[in-house]
């Protein structure tokens, strides 16, 4: 497997703990074509802290991807494209538009295109995973799904180091958002990561901006059939990527400055344990929280908290059945008439079936 394809597989598998193997379609003129993805059906029982209980069913998370790998001289190249059906721009409840998730090219240790940000690589591979589609990395520096795949990213991998230049979260930034991280893995299966982030942050005072930097550490410890994951971060300018800021959880509009335009500090941590009970049954317990040292007037909470308890059963080699209870203290996104991405404060129970092809 090429360096680029290893990167692609590790990226796709960082959030869910499952076995993936792309189906090779064959080779044409020296290029190997492969297809991968899954069909997922989910039912979510929603029990909000305020309001009536409800139920949502969907297969919108189903996705498909294609890869094209080729060796040109001594260079290993990979083109990768993936989409799902989460675009909620359509009005009909049962008709959803195709959404581009990934579209990138890798040449040896350089990757460019739309794909995971550097914060994701610094935390997700060291997490225990879950079924939750909203806030799957809450507590880590990459917990905001709204910006987890910037429109353009450039990654350069050098040994255990990864350097990233990203389409800035602030549209008028003078330079790309920056991430530098280093991963160390041991022969016994333990893994550790340290990352530094920096970006040009909009202050709201005309065209003025300030530089915000943050530090993140993450690790996964492996003890036989049990994985223990821990992560923590703190700094300025990190709220938009972590999914919590001065104005709470607001997707791409998460604020890293207070009402005077001064940078706030965001701090978060997560802890999780995953245990393989049998060859087919895995259990996961995870807790994550993100806190802003200053929040807008009228906000009841300065901290976003999320707890997940998950069971995943491999009924067949490529068919997973899942059950997850989760609870969060505030909504992760504001209600919008044009979006079904709202997840209210309270508890949820998800039942899902996912078939990988």
Image (cartoon, helix red, strand yellow):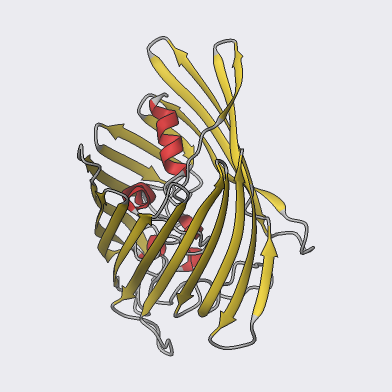
The image quadrant that residue 290 belongs to is bottom left
Q: Position of residue 156 (x, y in %)?
A: 33, 34
Query: What residue do we see at 20% from left, 40% from top?
Result: 186
The image quadrant that residue 353 belongs to is bottom right
User: From this viewpoint, is residue 176 visible?
Assistant: no
Query: What residue do we see at 34% from left, 79% from top?
Result: 260
Left or right placement of residue 288 versus residue 30 in this view: left
Query: What residue do we see at 26% from left, 62% from top?
Result: 233
Which image quarter holds the C terminus?
top right
Q: Position of residue 130 (x, y in %)?
A: 46, 59
The image quadrant that residue 83 belongs to is top right
Q: Is residue 332 above or below residue 181?
A: below
Query: What residue do we see at 28% from left, 65% from top?
Result: 236
Left or right placement of residue 190 versus residue 94 in this view: left
Q: Is residue 127 above or below residue 153?
A: below
Left or right placement of residue 302 versus residue 313 in this view: left
Q: Position of residue 227 (x, y in %)?
A: 30, 53
Q: Position of residue 127 (x, y in %)?
A: 35, 54
Q: How many marks?
A: 0
User: From this viewpoint, is residue 34 visible?
Assistant: yes
Which image quarter holds the N terminus?
top left
Q: Nearer the viewer, residue 109 or 193?
A: 193
């Amino acid at each position: 497997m090429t360096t680029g394809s290893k990167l692609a597989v590790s990226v796709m598998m960082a959030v869910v703990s499952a076995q993936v193997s792309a189906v090779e379609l064959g080779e044409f003129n020296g290029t190997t074509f492969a297809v991968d993805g899954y069909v997922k059906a989910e039912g979510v029982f929603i029990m909000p802290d305020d309001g009536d209980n409800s139920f949502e069913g969907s297969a919108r998370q189903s996705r498909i991807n294609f890869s094209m790998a080729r060796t040109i001289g001594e260079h290993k190249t990979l083109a990768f494209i993936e989409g799902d059906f989460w675009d909620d721009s359509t009005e009909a409840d049962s008709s959803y538009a195709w959404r581009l998730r990934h579209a990138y090219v890798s040449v040896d240790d350089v990757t460019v295109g739309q794909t995971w940000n550097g914060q994701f690589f610094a935390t997700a591979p060291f997490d225990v995973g879950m079924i939750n589609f909203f806030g799957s990395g809450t507590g880590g520096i990459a917990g905001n799904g709204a910006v987890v795949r910037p429109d353009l990213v450039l990654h350069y991998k050098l040994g255990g180091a990864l350097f990233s230049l990203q389409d800035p979260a602030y549209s008028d930034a003078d330079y790309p958002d920056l991430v530098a991280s280093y991963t160390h893995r041991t022969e016994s299966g333990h893994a550790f990561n340290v990352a530094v982030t920096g970006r040009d942050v909009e202050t709201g005072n005309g065209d003025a901006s300030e530089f915000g930097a943050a530090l993140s550490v993450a690790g996964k410890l492996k003890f036989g059939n049990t994985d223990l994951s821990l992560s923590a971060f703190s700094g300025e300018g990190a709220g938009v990527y972590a999914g919590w800021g001065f104005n709470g959880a607001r997707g791409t509009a998460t604020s890293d400055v207070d009402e005077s335009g001064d940078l706030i500090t965001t701090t978060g941590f997560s802890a999780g344990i995953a245990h393989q009970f049998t060859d087919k049954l895995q259990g996961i317990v995870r807790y994550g929280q993100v806190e802003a040292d200053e929040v807008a007037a009228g906000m009841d909470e300065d901290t976003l908290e999320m707890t997940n308890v998950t069971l995943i059963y491999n009924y067949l080699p490529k068919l997973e059945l899942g059950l997850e209870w989760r609870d969060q203290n505030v909504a992760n996104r504001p209600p919008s008439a044009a979006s079904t991405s709202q997840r209210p404060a309270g508890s949820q129970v998800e039942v899902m079936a996912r078939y990988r092809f």
